[in-house]
Amino acid sequence: MAIYTKEEARAIMEKALSFSTADSCEINLSGSESGNIRYARNTVSTAGHRSNQTLVVQSSYGKRSGTATVDEFDDASLERVVKRAEELAKLSPENPEFMEPLGPQEYDESTTYVEATAKITPEQRAEIARASIEPARAKDVTSAGFLNDSAGFSAMMNSNGLFAYNQATNASFSVTMRTNDGTGSGWATRDANDIAKLNAEEASKSAIDKALMSRKAKAIEPGKYTVILEPAASEQLLGNMFGSLNARTADEGRSFMSKEGGGTKLGEKIVDERVNIWSDPRHPEVPTAPWNGNGQPVKKMNWIENGVVKNLAYSRYWAEQQGKDAVPFPSNAIMEGGDASLEDMIKDTKRGILVTRLWYIRTVDPQTLLYTGLTRDGTFFIENGKLKHPIKNFRFNESPIIMLNNLETLGQQVRINGNLIPYMKVRDFTFTSLSDAV
Amino acid sequence: MKRRDFVQLAGLGAGAFMLPTHLMGNSIPVEALLAPGMDVATKKQMADVALNTARSLGASYADARIGRYLNQYVFTREDKVQNVVNTESFGIGVRVIANGTWGFASTNSVTPDGIKKATEQAVAIAKANSKIQKEPVKLAPVQGHGEVSWKTPIKKDFKDVPVSEKVDLLLKANASAMENGANFVNSALFMVNEQKYFASTEGSYIDQDVHRIWPTFGVTAIDRSAGKFKSRQALSAPMGMGYEYMDGLASEKIEGPEGLNLYRNSYDIVEDATLAAKQAKEMLSAKSVDPGKYDLVLEPNHLGLTIHESVGHPLELDRVLGYEANYAGTSFATLDKWKTKDFNYGSDIVNLVADKTQPHSLGQVGYDDEGVKCKKWDLVRNGTLVNYQAIRDQAHIINEDESHGCCYSQSWNDVQFQRMPNVSLEAGTEPYSAKQMIEDTEKGIYIAGRGSYSIDQQRYNFQFGGTVFYEIKDGKIAGMLNDVAYQSNTQEFWNSCAKICDKDDYRLFGSFFDGKGQPSQISAVSHGSSTTRFNGVNVINTGRTI
């Protein structure tokens, strides 16, 4: 049993804390069970199960800290691990960025745990794979997919009176469907806290349709095009931008948020005024834990409002240095969408490209947040409001900042990797070369 | 130490990377790194519990891997030690074949009870999945090796070197970078010891002790008035060596153009950080490249990543067959191309070899993670595709009767599968230096070190950046360049390979983080080459304004 209840976790951590003689002590206890099934070539390939639980003690004397870990929780083990952390702390160099543990905090209720996900069996996983493989075989398509589910808890307690506990489940599914003539490929991904909300069959069908539609793609010239980006296509670029909203690197002058002549772009408009991005642990579609690894409460926070950067993340140390309030890093990203359906967006496009996903995305220049990568698994040419034909994949070189300045239309939101991202139409997206890859 | 802190600390320069769980492990005191761990006789007993349980439950094959993974990491920035981390991860992974289907389970409870439970779970998974199995597993025969052992031939075990010595070295490198114009410097030392015990129902009990090291840094120079910053990463390589890699031996140093210091099997981090600071400052005002066709002179610590992406990956047989279709992708190098025995991968001077036995390389071991003795074999000979990388359950597909010995798992907690061996470009046979190569180049760019990299899912179209770029005009270096990336197509690129320097210029590039599989696993791999020229490659300008 790797998943403790709140009271079981509290009892173990209180016991551990009772052995502490250091200036301060912080304890993290976590456990998880996860399972997966993987299939390819229309048959199962590998599958596995993992179980893990661990208790981490960080003891501190002044700015000297030591950390020790244990996976057995009887009294003798708990005493031993606390003593070891204390011995290590005494031998450690001072950490100039050490922060005192937080005191008691108020947290919101969590909605991240769903029993059905925690109870999944190997047979259910095999059935999900079967329901993806059989429709593929029937259409002369080859499926390759992966289902991963996990259930776990994390808890934190310290000598200043803080106690936090959360349980979470997650299930994610992705599938690639390739036509047996090798000329078409489609893909879909779904994720949910509740396995019952994860419709792998529907995702598989969508990927099969994309594969069949993308057969015998034609080459068109690389260049700047209007693109309709499905949420899976823009999510990583947006995530990279979001992850770079860090006050410290901006203040240090080594971020896209650093300004000519010094200072940062906080409070400045950096993208189209229709862009609104926030994070919210309590959003029913994309819930996350109400506290982070520091024990800080995580609340709804606006990051970009009407195109203006409203907040940068401040670690507790950097906030203290700068005389600001600490702002925890976001735990999810929610970008406001619009009413337009994908069909509407296609209908309103004279000449453009529909992109299913962007892949192998890597930083080219951190100064401008320039990224490169490729389209994959379904790229289509749009002309006079209609999908005309599949096109060969492109390499792009583009910055999410430039992309969000070239926004044309916002469409409906979709959950993708724990975030809510809208369909987006963007002009002048830069494709720099053609790829023969299917 | 928490994962979040670790990831933040591991942020070298502008980009942070995620480390997988086994590189985290449990924190332990430094002296515990020197504890011997479970003795071989007990490991054999424990492994036999798994093998016997699997047999009794009807498995036709089973293997058990008991792993103890010891890591030490040292992180510093400027004049501060950010953290010293010692971790241990210990457990057992059991893999079985039941009803012709793989099953796997792992546990950190290395006791007869824990192992029995994990084995039962592995068999249950195999049986559940066998109901939808269409391609029963077929294993190539392997010799049972009995009780054998292997150890990375190191001179200095990192565990015997005091932490203070490591910290002092990094702080010295940082200080020198700051004195020479850096605004920021992060440096780190990653040291890894995999103690792996493998046993299988084929009659092998293999005990291996594998060592790796990676010193690295990122130096940043800032021009606040222009709101610009440039970073220069270390020109070290992660190596399959002990702490002796840090000795900075003059005999292992290679002189590059413009005072550039390049390193073979010994690294001088202070010297490299000093130059990095000067170069980062120089980059702030370097010329932005004119896009167009150039002859590229690629230094081994740069070319290694191009070899990795455009040769190593497309010749992984699991990708070719479609097992990675949903993640890393498939391959343009299909079986029908290979079967012609005439598929032109590159120009006729291109010889690419796979080698799990290469000294100092990250991939060097005695036996792979399914008990196959390691070896060297050809992938591309005189420009023609001749072979792939295959393990026991794939060998029959390419009509071979033995595995190539390149099966690997990142930890006891993950299932082993086909992973890239060291894949290297053979040196030129005629005496020829990098200096001569530059002299023989009219319009070119010399690129050293790794940079941005991206390639499509069938490994045709790629784009690479680098660490430092120099323009070559009429056989001479004409200054530093900025905003350089080259785009090409694998077959076209390797066919533009015009000249390869000789063996005196040969050295290894390495990566600790080759990623593949779902759940994703990493693997450490090296790629050797000499400086090589590729003619008429398309170079783009990556400069933008936001």
Image (cartoon, rainbow, N blue to C red):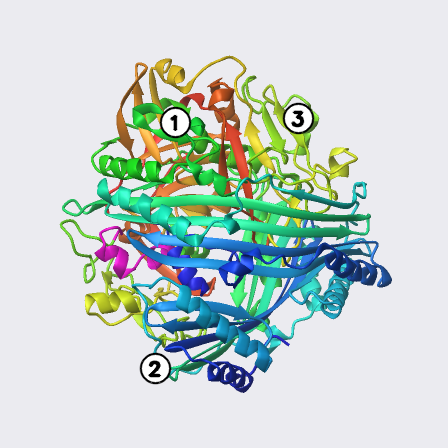
Judging by the rendered image, the residue that carries numbered circle 1 is B538
**Which residue corresponds to the image point at 61% horizontal and 76% vertical from the top-left?**
A116
To the question of a shared chain for discs 3 and 2, the answer is: no
The chain under label 3 reads B
Q: Position of residue A418 (x, y in %)?
A: 46, 65
Q: Is residue A243 magenta?
A: yes
Judging by the rendered image, the residue that carries numbered circle 2 is A103
Q: Secondary structure at mark 3?
A: loop
Within 10 angstroms of label 2, few (less than 14), some, or many (20 or more) residues?
some
For residue A359, side relative to residue A183 (left or right): left
The chain under label 2 reads A
Within 10 angstroms of label 1, few (less than 14), some, or many (20 or more) residues?
some
Within 10 angstroms of label 3, few (less than 14), some, or many (20 or more) residues?
many
Identify residue type, mark 1.
Asn
Q: Nearer the viewer, residue B188 or A155?
A: B188
Judging by the rendered image, the residue that carries numbered circle 3 is B386
Q: Give the extent of the magenta segment.
A: A238-256
**Which residue corresponds to the image point at 52% horizontal and 59% vertical from the top-left?**
B31
Q: In this rendering, is residue A352 above or below A57?
A: above
Distance in Å between CA atoms under marks 3 and 2: 65 Å
Q: Position of residue A305 (x, y in %)?
A: 25, 65
Identify residue type, mark 3.
Val
Identify residue type, mark 2.
Gly
Q: Quadrant of the N terminus of chain B?
A: bottom left
Q: Secondary structure at mark 2?
A: loop
Label disc, if present, on residue B420 of the rendered structure: none
